[in-house]
C-alpha cells in the first residue's frame, strides 16, 4: 500500500512538473509575440517612512505621588502593496515609539524615573480615496518600560496586541516621492497604551509592476 | 474637537473592532443618611453565633427565595440564599430602646443587582438579651425592608427562625476564590486584596484562597496573573511580569482595578488572622520562586495563631510539580512546615503528608479517590464550584469538606440544605 501511494505521488508530481513547464513555455511564447509597447502599471510596492508626535491618554497609579508627561514620539517604516485598479491595499509597518515618561515614588520614598515605550509590527489594510488614505492595522507589540532610581535600573518587557487606525492626506506626490500628513490613534489594550499621533509620512521609493 | 472627544471616539471604534467592552460596576450601596448602625454600639461578638440558623422568608421571597441560611463571622452576619446565589451582608447594632438592628446590603453576584437591607429583631426582650450578651432563650423573628441600589427602603422582608444549622465551623469550608467576587462579577472590589478578604467573610466565606507571586526582591505578594495587565491593574508604568519589579516599584506604579494597593502576603495573613474568623487560608503559590518565602510566612502566622488560641492555619497548596519540588527543597532545611494541600495527584497527599486534596471539579466528584484520600486522613476541597447544579451534585456525591467558589453564600446555603457534615479526618494508618 505504501509503495502504491508513493508511486501515485510520484506520478502526480511528475504530472504537475510537466504541466508547469508546458505552461511556462506557452507563456514565454505569448510574451515573445507581444508588441514592444510599455504595458500599464498594475500595482506598486511603495516604501515609506513616518515620524509622529504622540499624546498618550494615560494615568499614574498614584497621581498625587508622581508626575506624568504623556507627550512622546514614534518612527515607523512601511512597505505597501498598492494595486492601481482597486482602492484597497495591504501594508506591513514596523517601528517603535516612546509614549510616556514620568516620575513615581515608592513607599520607601525612592523616586523612580519611568519610561514607557513599545515596538510594533503591524500588518494592515488601507483605503485610498483621492488624496486621503484610511488605514487599519493590527499586530503584535513589544512593550518595554524602564524604571530607574539612584540605586537601580530595571526594565520590563511584555508582548501584547496592538491596533491602530490612521487617516492621512497626501499633499505632495511625484513618483517615487510623496509626502502626507497623518493623524492616527494607536491602542495596546493589554498594556494601557492609548495614544493619538500626528506626523509626517514620506514615500521614498516605489517599484512598479506592469 | 476636544482631545477627550477624540479619545472617546477612537476608543469606541477600536473597542468595537477588538470586541472589548468594559462591564459596568455594581459597587456596594450605602444608606444616604449613613444608616442606623452608627447610632448604637455593635452587637456583642458573643451574640452573633446565637443568631445563626435556617430562616423562613415570610415576606421578600421575590428577592431571597423561600428560605435563607444565617451564618456569622467577625462582626459580620450573612444571609445566604439559593435564589440567584444571593448574599446579604449585614452588621448588627444595639440601639436605644432595646432595638437590635441589622443593616447592610444584598447582592446577586452573577448580575449587577445590589440593594440595601435593614432588619429589626421584633422581640425587644430577645434584643435586650442579645445586646447584653446573655444567652438567647427564644426563637428569632426579623422584620424590615430592602431596596434596589442605594434607593430608599421599600420592599418588605420578614424572616422567621426555622431550624438550627448543621455544624460548619472547622468542618465544612466555603472557600472564597481569591475574593468575595470574581473579577468578572464587577462588584467594585478587586480579587486578592485586603478589601476582598474582609468582604469574603461578609459574603459567607469560612476560608480564603489567595494567589501568591513574588517580586524581584523576593517579597510574596497577592496577584493572580503572571503580568500586570490592563484588565486587573491601573497605572501606565505598571507593566510587565510581576517578578520584574521590586515591591517598592510595584507599589509606586501599580494599583488594582478599583484603586486598591497590591497587598503583600504578610499583610494579608495578618488581616485574615486578626480581622476575620476564617478557618484557614489556601495559598495558591503560582511560581516555585515564591515557595520558600511564602512558606516562612505561613509558618510564622500559624505560630501566631497558635499563640492566640486560634485554629486558623495557612495551608500551602502544591499546584504543580515545580511548586512541589520547591516545597520539598525548602523542607530539607526547615525546622517545621505548614500544612500542605495537593491540587493534582491524590497519591501525593499521603506521600507528602499533606492535610488535604484539592481536585478540580472538571474531572467530576471522583468518589473513589475521595475515599482513598480520606482513608489517609486528609480532607477534600474541590475547586472551583460556582454553579448551583454542580455544587448540589458534588455535595451529594462525595460529601466534601469544602469547595473553592466565587459563590460562598450559595455553597454554604446548599451545604446546609442538601449536604451532610463531613467526617472528621482520621489519623492515617501506620505504614
Image (cartoon, rainbow, N blue to C red):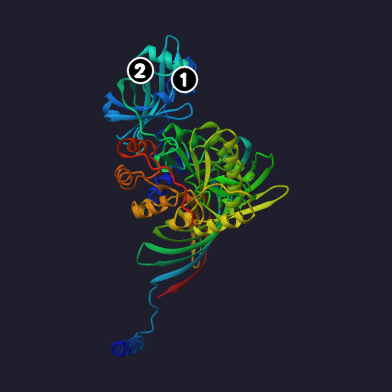
- The local secondary structure at tag 2 comes to loop
| Same chain shared by disc 2 and disc 1 | yes
Q: Residue furthest top?
A: B97
Residue B72 % position (x, y): 43, 29
Q: Say whether residue A103 is left or right of residue B406.
A: right
Marked residue chain, label 2 = B
The residue beneath circle 1 is B43
Asked if residue B360 is positioned above or below residue B257 in the image, the reply reads below
The residue beneath circle 2 is B138
Q: Nearer the viewer, residue A3 or B294?
A: B294
Q: Say whether residue B296 is left or right of residue B66.
A: right
Q: Nearer the viewer, residue B318 or A87?
A: B318
Q: Say whether residue A3 is left or right of residue B92.
A: left
Q: Residue furthest right?
A: A150
Residue B84 % position (x, y): 31, 36
Asked if residue B264 is positioned above or below residue A93 in the image, the reply reads above
Q: Quadrant of the N terminus of chain A?
A: bottom left
Q: Say whether residue B339 is left or right of residue B397.
A: right
Residue B59 visible = no
Residue A122 % position (x, y): 47, 60
What is the spatial separation of the Cα atoms under label 2 and label 1, in whole angstroms? 17 Å
Q: In the drawing, what numbered circle is on residue A77?
A: none
- The local secondary structure at tag 1 comes to loop
Residue B375 visible = yes
Residue at 43%, 41% in the rendered image = B175
Residue B416 % position (x, y): 33, 35
Amino acid at each position: 500500500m505504501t509503495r502504491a501511494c508513493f508511486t501515485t505521488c510520484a506520478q502526480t508530481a511528475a504530472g504537475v512538473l510537466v504541466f508547469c513547464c508546458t505552461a511556462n513555455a506557452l507563456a514565454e511564447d505569448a510574451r515573445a509575440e507581444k508588441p514592444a509597447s510599455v504595458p500599464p502599471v498594475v500595482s506598486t510596492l511603495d516604501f515609506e517612512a513616518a515620524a509622529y508626535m504622540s499624546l498618550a491618554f494615560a494615568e499614574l497609579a498614584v497621581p498625587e505621588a508622581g508626575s506624568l508627561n504623556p507627550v512622546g514620539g514614534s518612527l515607523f517604516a512601511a512597505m505597501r502593496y498598492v494595486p492601481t485598479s482597486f482602492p484597497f491595499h495591504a501594508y506591513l509597518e514596523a517601528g517603535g515609539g516612546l509614549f510616556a515618561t514620568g516620575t513615581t515614588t515608592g513607599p520607601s520614598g525612592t523616586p523612580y524615573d519611568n519610561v514607557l515605550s513599545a515596538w510594533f509590527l503591524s500588518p494592515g489594510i488601507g483605503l485610498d480615496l483621492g488624496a486621503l488614505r484610511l488605514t487599519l492595522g493590527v499586530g503584535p507589540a513589544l512593550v518595554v518600560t524602564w524604571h530607574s532610581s539612584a540605586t537601580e535600573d530595571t526594565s520590563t518587557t511584555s508582548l501584547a496586541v496592538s491596533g491602530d487606525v490612521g487617516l492621512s492626506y497626501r499633499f505632495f506626490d511625484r513618483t517615487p516621492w510623496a509626502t502626507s500628513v497623518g493623524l492616527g490613534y494607536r491602542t495596546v489594550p493589554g498594556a494601557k497604551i492609548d495614544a493619538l499621533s500626528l506626523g509626517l509620512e514620506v514615500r521614498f521609493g516605489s517599484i512598479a509592476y506592469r | 474637537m476636544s482631545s477627550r472627544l477624540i479619545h472617546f471616539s477612537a476608543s469606541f471604534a477600536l473597542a468595537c473592532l477588538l470586541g472589548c467592552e468594559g462591564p459596568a460596576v455594581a459597587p456596594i450601596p450605602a444608606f444616604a443618611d449613613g444608616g442606623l448602625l452608627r447610632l448604637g454600639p455593635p452587637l456583642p461578638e458573643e451574640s452573633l453565633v446565637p443568631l445563626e440558623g435556617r430562616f423562613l422568608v415570610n415576606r421578600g421571597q421575590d428577592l431571597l427565595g423561600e428560605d435563607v441560611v444565617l451564618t456569622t463571622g467577625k462582626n459580620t452576619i450573612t444571609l445566604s440564599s439559593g435564589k440567584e446565589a444571593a448574599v446579604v451582608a449585614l452588621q448588627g447594632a444595639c440601639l436605644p430602646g432595646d432595638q437590635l438592628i441589622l443593616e447592610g446590603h444584598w447582592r446577586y453576584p452573577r448580575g449587577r443587582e445590589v440593594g440595601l437591607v435593614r432588619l429589626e429583631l421584633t422581640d425587644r426582650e430577645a434584643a435586650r438579651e442579645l445586646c447584653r450578651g446573655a444567652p438567647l432563650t427564644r426563637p428569632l423573628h426579623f422584620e424590615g425592608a430592602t431596596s434596589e441600589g442605594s434607593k430608599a427602603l421599600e420592599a418588605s422582608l420578614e424572616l422567621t427562625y426555622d431550624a438550627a444549622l448543621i455544624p460548619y465551623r472547622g468542618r465544612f469550608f466555603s472557600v472564597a476564590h481569591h475574593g468575595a467576587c470574581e473579577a468578572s462579577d464587577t462588584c467594585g472590589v478587586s480579587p486578592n486584596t485586603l478589601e476582598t478578604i474582609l468582604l469574603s467573610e461578609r459574603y459567607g466565606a469560612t476560608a480564603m484562597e489567595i494567589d501568591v507571586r513574588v517580586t524581584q526582591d523576593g517579597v510574596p505578594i497577592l496577584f493572580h496573573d503572571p503580568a500586570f495587565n490592563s484588565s486587573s491593574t491601573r497605572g501606565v508604568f505598571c507593566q510587565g511580569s510581576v517578578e520584574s519589579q521590586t515591591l517598592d516599584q510595584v507599589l509606586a506604579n501599580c494599583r488594582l482595578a478599583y484603586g486598591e494597593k497590591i497587598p503583600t502576603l504578610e499583610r494579608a495573613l495578618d488581616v485574615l488572622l486578626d480581622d476575620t474568623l476564617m478557618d484557614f487560608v489556601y495559598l495558591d503559590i503560582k511560581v516555585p520562586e515564591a515557595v520558600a518565602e511564602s512558606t516562612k510566612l505561613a509558618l510564622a502566622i500559624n505560630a501566631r495563631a497558635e499563640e492566640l488560641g486560634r485554629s486558623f492555619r495557612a495551608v500551602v497548596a502544591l499546584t504543580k510539580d515545580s511548586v512541589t519540588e520547591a516545597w520539598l527543597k525548602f523542607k530539607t532545611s526547615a525546622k517545621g512546615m505548614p500544612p500542605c494541600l495537593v491540587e493534582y495527584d491524590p497519591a501525593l497527599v499521603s506521600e507528602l503528608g499533606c492535610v488535604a486534596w484539592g481536585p478540580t471539579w472538571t474531572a467530576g466528584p471522583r468518589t473513589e479517590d475521595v475515599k482513598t484520600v480520606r482513608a489517609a486522613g486528609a480532607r477534600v476541597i474541590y475547586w472551583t464550584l460556582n454553579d448551583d447544579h454542580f455544587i448540589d451534585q458534588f455535595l451529594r456525591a462525595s460529601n466534601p469538606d469544602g469547595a473553592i467558589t466565587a459563590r460562598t453564600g450559595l455553597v454554604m446555603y446548599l451545604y446546609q440544605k442538601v449536604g451532610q457534615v463531613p467526617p472528621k479526618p482520621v489519623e492515617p494508618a501506620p505504614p
